[in-house]
Image (cartoon, rainbow, N blue to C red):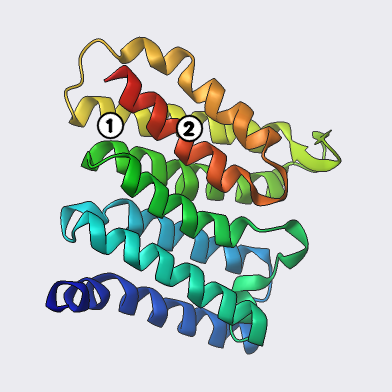
Amino acid sequence: MVSFLRAFLLTGLPIFLLVVATDYFWRKNKYQNELTRKFIHITVGTYAAFWPWFISWGDIELLALGALCALILSYTFNIFKSVHLARRYGTGEYLSAISIALVAIITHDHLLFAAAVLHLSLADGIAAVIGTRFGKGNIYHIFGQRKSLIGTSTFWLCSVIILAIVFSVGHISGIWPALLWLPLVATALENIGIYGTDNLLVPVAVVLILRALI
């Protein structure tokens, strides 16, 4: 109980305060756009990627499931409107929380966990921001959903950078050829994972593949 309370104070409380502050400014019409939701997505997800370094795996699973419950309550009672700006897009918010819990169950390797979750937060979030800003002239459709070439290219590049850093920091030998094809696999899954399902498909696939290779 003491361990989980410490984990909540280190992780859950800062995220809650961030969401409250962001929602406050959103309601004041200072940042009322899609970038607000992506800011939360990138910030919270990137922070979560480094949780294994200071809280236990069991606490990560509990916190992720707690976040899922909080999201459901927020959606049901329309509490944090800024978080749910993209209701029309599907279930991506909820699948993000589920995927963090699943990745923590699949691996207890700090770097593999970080690699998978950073695909969920940084790669996906930055690609969405770049695609929204610069993708109007290079749109294509997958299963009826709009994608952009520059957004997809950004996701691929972020994937390459994330994996290269993880391989370097972890001194993982014999796996470098995966840089030629694993980012392509992740990018393909991000494309076909419509209605937010990419938030589950990509990190789970990345961690399973890395675990198999290592």
Q: Is residue 137 above or below residue 47?
A: above
- The residue singled out by tag 1 in the image is 166
Name the residue rendered at 72%, 50% in the picture: 195
Residue 138 in the image: x percent, y percent? 80, 33
Residue 79 in the image: x percent, y percent? 60, 86
Three-letter code for the amino acid on which mark 2 is drawn: Ala
- The residue singled out by tag 2 in the image is 205
Three-letter code for the amino acid on which mark 1 is drawn: Val
Count of number-bearing discs: 2
Q: Is residue 211 above or below residue 85?
A: above
Residue 26 in the image: x percent, y percent? 61, 81
- Where residue 63 sits, quadrant-wise, is bottom left
Q: Nearer the viewer, residue 134 or 180?
A: 180
Q: Nearer the viewer, residue 167 or 213?
A: 213
Residue 32 in the image: x percent, y percent? 67, 76
| Residue 192 in view of the camera | yes
Disc 1 crowd, CA 10 A, few/some/many (<14, 14-19, 20+):
some
Name the residue rendered at 42%, 65% in the picture: 65
Q: Check the image and name the residue furthest to the right.
A: 144
Q: Earlier in the sequence, mark 2 or mark 1?
A: 1
Cα distance, mark 2 to mark 1? Answer: 16 Å
- Where residue 5 sits, quadrant-wise, is bottom left
